[in-house]
Image: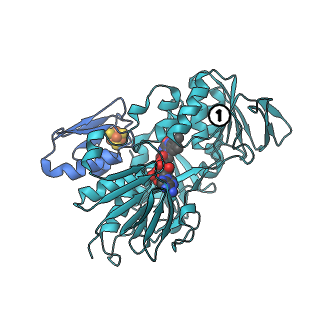
Chain colours: A cyan, B blue
Amino acid sequence: MARQSVHIVGASLAGLRAAETLRRSGFEGPVVLIGDEPHRPYDRPPLSKQFLAGDWERDRLALSPEDRFSALELEVRLGVQASGFDLQTRTLRTSAGDETVDGLLIATGARCRSLPGSEHMAGVHVLRSLDDAETLRAELAAGPRRVVVVGAGFIGAEVAATCRGRGIEVSMIEALSAPLARVLGEEMGAVSAEVHREQGVDLRCGVGVDGLDADSNGRVCAVRLSDGSTIDADVVVVGIGVVPNTEWLVGSGLELDDGVVCDSTLSAGPGVVAAGDVARWPNQRFGETMRVEHWDNAVEQGVYAARRLLADDDAELEPFSPVPWFWSDQYQIKIQMAGRIRADDQMEIVTGSVEERRFAALYGRAGRLVGVLGFNRPRHVMHYKTLIHDGASFDEALAASL
Amino acid sequence: MKVVVDFDLCESNAICMQIAPDVFEVRDDDFLYVLNENPDEGDRARMEECVQRCPKQAITIED
Ligand SMILES: Cc1cc2nc3c(=O)[nH]c(=O)nc-3n(C[C@H](O)[C@H](O)[C@H](O)COP(=O)(O)OP(=O)(O)OC[C@H]3O[C@@H](n4cnc5c(N)ncnc54)[C@H](O)[C@@H]3O)c2cc1C
Ligand code: SF4
């Protein structure tokens, strides 16, 4: 039976791209877009980059210009939170009342993990939403003596870079032996560490945070580390990963396991699909069940999941099996990565050099090309991404000239 | 339909080129070139996909 209506929960990247795809595919029924933030869909990557730097204002963050957004003719419900769903009765519970839904697209993304015990301490921040970014930006503008970034993942690293760009002293704490060691391997992790230190970041690796100290006003003033040292801090930014927003689906009848569990076509149940940071699915290309927290994945999944919802539940669809790809901008370096890199993969630099901070590195496993990392080599990364997609061997990739 | 790229935003990651190599090309000099600024009306869906997928929001369609 043809789809009558679609409810999209989560009014951000995946949800918006899904709505656009429904309309572009000719779907004319009601499309309801529900989001708990008060803002129209906006782009998150600039929040740690241009917006935090003070170079961009919020009007530059819209994911769709106003006229195009209205042309989609969505029923937009902002500031409304979904609190429950029942697969049997197809009841969606929201802070604005219950409704019965036909097609449901889950795109509730993820939220930041917080440092236990620091949730309500003044001066301690996470960075996920526009509101987070505005608060943090105001703190940076007030001229803190030192910002301590906890976690040297991509968000932490970008915040550190942006703070340095604003001339602020930064310490960054990383539990691993090097930033991103688990994602890029030890060798490239060490390169990343070098970059931060060159830029004047006081980077401490292999240590954990024991706790935060507050002054008499309840505002953070120091970070205590597991090696016994203490760093004075006016502002602390916690970047220790995210957790998918699935609590509202507990008891819904959908399977949850660090995300909404989907099949290889992003279907989570009859007439229910998931997309973006919240979705976990078997990516057959890599023989691995994954949940991906990248911008491009949210777009591709939003597009795919919308099409999935318009097809019959038992329709045979090409499985969703992309080569994950993402970027991160730190200092003057544009990092891009494609594929699935593991710390113990074979690694070889094929273009440029680490010293000039401009290179492409290939990662191989069991004779296959599985990943590529580029520093200021966007074109090369895309080329090798295609080779990964085509199932090239590691030797073929090394021999390919560009 | 007119396709416009904001070259201040574009970072030459060639996402658009993967979707529409006949319209967008990132060359050896690492710059993006728009090969056809006025794609046919029938190509709108594909151009909209390029707009959606551009991570830097650098592509716009002017009617
Ligand atoms: C600061 C920052 C910088 C980033 N930089 C990069 C980058 O450089 N490169 C890259 O590839 N990726 C980057 N990302 C990641 C990228 O932005 C995410 O992968 C993307 O936003 C995921 O989109 P989504 O729609 O799945 O989820 P989200 O963007 O998380 O959106 C989910 C939405 O659903 C809402 N919601 C949650 N629960 C409910 C509920 N119960 N009811 C109603 N609404 C709900 C949330 O409030 C949110 O608005 C960055 C992310 C951040 C935060
Ligand atoms: S997708 Fe966007 S950023 Fe990438 S090359 Fe095309 S226009 Fe430039």
What is the quadrant of residue B36 in the picture?
Answer: top left
Q: Nearer the viewer, residue A139 or B28?
A: A139
Give x and y (percent) for residue B58.
Answer: 33, 37
Residue drawn at the location 30% of the way across and 71% of the way down: A311
Residue drawn at the location 35% of the way across and 76% of the way down: A313
Image: A93 above or below B61 = below
Labels in figure, total: 1
Q: Nearer the viewer, residue A81 or A321?
A: A81
Q: Secondary structure at mark 1?
A: helix
Q: Residue tagged by mark 1?
A: A194
- Residue farthest along the right direction in this orientation: A228
Image: A154 above or below A261 = above
Residue A384, visible in the rendered structure: no
Is A243 placed left or right of A213 in the picture?
left
Give x and y (percent) for residue A351.
Answer: 47, 41
| Residue type of the residue flagged with mark 1 | Glu
Give x and y (percent) for residue A315.
Answer: 32, 76
Is A334 placed left or right of B38 in the picture?
right
Residue A153, visible in the rendered structure: yes
Give x and y (percent) for residue A140.
Answer: 60, 26
Q: The C terminus of chain A appears in which quarter of the rendering?
A: top left
Is B43 placed left or right of A81 in the picture?
left
Q: The N terminus of chain A appears in which quarter of the rendering?
A: bottom left
Residue drawn at the location 29% of the way across and 59% of the way down: A22
Crowd class of label 1 (few under 14; some 14 to 19; many from 20; radius 10 Å): some
Whether label 1 lies within 8 Å of ligand 1 gets the answer: no
Of all chains, the one bearing label 1 is: A
Q: Nearer the viewer, residue A147 or A12?
A: A12
Q: Nearer the viewer, residue A1 or A300?
A: A1
Image: A302 above or below A233 = below
What is the quadrant of residue A212 in the picture?
Answer: top right
What is the quadrant of residue A213 in the picture?
Answer: top right
